[in-house]
Amino acid sequence: DKAGLVPVLDSRGRYTVFAPVNDAFDKLPSEVVAKYNSDDWINHLQSLLLYHGLGQRVYSSDLTIGLKAKTLEGNVIEVTSLDPV
């Protein structure tokens, strides 16, 4: 757990995580991956991961264009596409 988020996600509650497919990670430049894995960038890694999580359960069948939700990082995101690619 490089980002130190296990306590957050292990805590009581319901969560939804929007995770890219492995191919998306494979396309990242190696220097970007290295930065996110460095101790100097741990806060950026945490923000990135928390931005992709919600503190509520949302199923794919719940998604509609225009749906807004607050991320674990604190920003509000809006569904703009239902295309998984």
Image (spheres, rainbow, N blue to C red):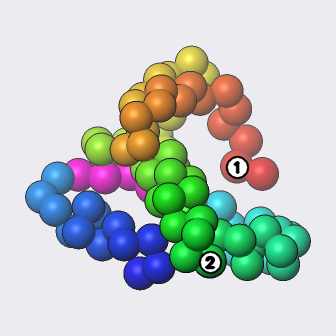
Rendering quarter of residue 17: bottom left
Residue 8's x, y, as percent? 26, 61
Q: Nearer the viewer, residue 44 or 29?
A: 44
Residue 16's x, y, as percent? 38, 51
Q: Residue at x 55, y 76 (%)?
A: 39
Numbered tag placed on residue 37 in the rendering:
2
Q: Residue at x 70, y 32 (%)?
A: 81
For marks 2 and 1, the one nearer the N-term is: 2
The magenta span reads 14-18
Q: Which residue is mark 1?
A: 84
Q: Residue at x 47, y 31 (%)?
A: 75
Q: The residue under label 1 is which amino acid type?
A: Pro
Q: Is residue 62 visible?
A: no
Residue 41's x, y, as percent? 59, 65
Using residue 2 as the reference point, say whether residue 4 is left or right of it. left
Q: Secondary structure at mark 1?
A: loop
Q: Secondary structure at mark 2?
A: helix
Report the predominant secondary structure element of the magenta stretch: loop
